[in-house]
Image: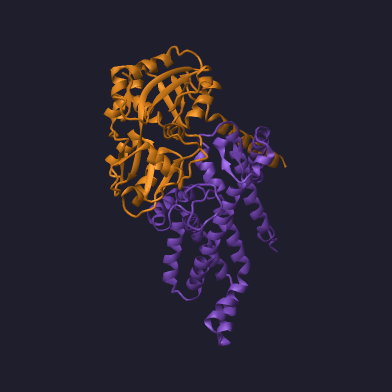
Chain colours: A purple, B orange
Amino acid sequence: MLASLAAVPPLMVVLLGMYLVVCSISALLQIPVAELFAVQWQPSGDSYGVLLLLTGTVTVTLMALVLTLLIGLSTSLYLTLYARPKMLQVANTALGTLGSLPSVVIGLWAMTWVVPLFGNSLSSAAITAALMIVPTFTLLCISALKQVPANLDENVRALGCSDRIRALVILQHARQGVIRALVLAASRALGEAVAIYLVAGNIAQWPELFGPIATLTTTLIGELDVATGAHRGALHILALLIMLLITLVSLFCRPKLIRKRT
Amino acid sequence: MKTYLDSKIKHVASLALMMVMVLLSGCGRDTTSQLNITGASTVYPIIEMAKEGFTKQHDIRLNVQAGGSTRGFEDTLAGRNDFGAMARDLTAEEAARVEVFPIAYDGIGIVVHASNPLKSITTETLQRIYRKEITNWSQLGGPNEPIVAVNKADGHATLKVFMKHAGLTRDEIKADVVAGDNAQVIRIAANTRGAVAYVSMGEVIEAAAIGMELKLVNLDGIEPTIEQVASEAYPLRRTLYLVSKVPPAGNASLLLQFLSSEEGKQIIKRGNYVPLP
């Protein structure tokens, strides 16, 4: 029973991948391959260049990751090293709640609070994506930092090191966990759709900090329900690209995750 | 060994059963007394509202799915629905392949944020805004506020109708925000001080009525009201259609009859659309 159920997730990934590949190949019968490399996405003019959308996705994700690193690392260091246990408990609950909010709720909130400040723009999109991934990242960081042996911290303190050195030593010891958390955050940001769609402006152009941006996922959301023919096929290619990007990112962290327990 | 094998077979069987159930779960419906309608999201509210009265009269279920006019048309050609819903005129080529039934008129309203002092706009100004020749409300005598031009995503009928009216090509339009469905256009307009957008009038009237911060402005001097759409004075209006692959008979013709009946006309009016005369 266990074995057959365990086969379900990989099977689903393979089936989904196959579905997207088949759809993409049939799309390529309608769209000249050269068209995919055009620097324009405008389905009504039969332009299906994925480059701008790909750049959009990567830029939003990278910016969100920088924000997440800044906020998440400092939060988790503070909570594990300095905060009182009560505070840690409260923060844990808050992070858990924030992390499980549906993306559309975060998106609607960002529409009212972030968009008035930064417009429907790349910045808003990155901040919103960061909001989505900070909680999980922080919680994973906290658990990584907690696994650092207590005597390491005691030794560092006994040596009279400054607070900064103490944090660095502990981070150094927990770095694998932190990297793993970051990779997970990255794949979530890559696939995030609804919240970003609500604030990004959704125009396919080169990234500008305060200009609108379209990503692979926002384009899918905005156009999938009305697309027909070649347009619909092109959207399947976008979906395949997202899947490939996320797979790449997950492969990047795989060896450490399935390290044998002995 | 036997028990092990037994349990293995049981598990495989239960797994297979589960998969079959999942596969079949979509197929259990009674297909004799229902009508499937797919297409324009602008027509969606009309059918949604007609559901109750229609089902009460005829005991026929209506299934509606919003997904754009062109999708509605393609679904009809492929025989995936009983009616396709379209919120734009059909091209001659399209019209030759299906049966076309106009059901109502809809005005497309020009909306701005409620705080915008603008009362009236001309088609020519709209054209220049969407070409980014005018980029600040101060150029139109308003406050110093950048104009945020909201556009509909490619594939939506409203975009096509707007482009045709304003004499714009897709390449000329330089928008600041692109939104998919009407609700999203309305959310953006109500949320952005500098916004200007075009969207189905009925939905704006509903949104303004529940307190969302947006308002309709006059277009070419004509007030954006249902009465003006009905009298054909309001310039930006379109016909909403149902299309079918074969001449409708039975249940399908009952729906057309219902929509053109007095009760159907009242429903269309309640949705802030204009029934056919």
The one of A17 and B89 positioned closer to us in this rendering: B89
Q: Seen from this angle, which residue lies furthest right?
A: B1
Q: Is residue B178 above or below residue A148?
A: above
Q: Which residue is drawn at 38% across and 44% down?
A: B196
Q: Is residue A134 above or below residue A152?
A: above
Where does the image place residue B191, in percent across and percent down from the top left? 36, 49
Q: In this view, does B203 lie above or below B178?
A: above
Determine the image quadrant of residue B24: top right
Q: Residue at x 39, y 46 (%)?
A: B188
Q: Residue at x 29, y 49 (%)?
A: B115
Where does the image place residue B240, in percent across and percent down from the top left? 40, 25
> Is A18 displayed left or right of B167 in the figure?
right
- Residue B86 visible within the image: yes
Where does the image place residue B2, in percent across and percent down from the top left? 71, 39
Image mark count: 0
**Which corner quadrant holds the N terminus of chain A?**
top right
> Is B2 displayed left or right of B113 in the figure?
right
- Residue B193 visible within the image: no
The one of B80 and A181 positioned closer to us in this rendering: B80
The one of A189 and B148 positioned closer to us in this rendering: B148
**Which corner quadrant holds the C terminus of chain A?**
bottom right
> Is A196 displayed left or right of B232 in the figure?
right
Q: Is residue B34 above or below residue A212?
A: above
Q: Residue at x 33, y 25 (%)?
A: B52
Where does the image place residue B140, in percent across and percent down from the top left? 34, 47
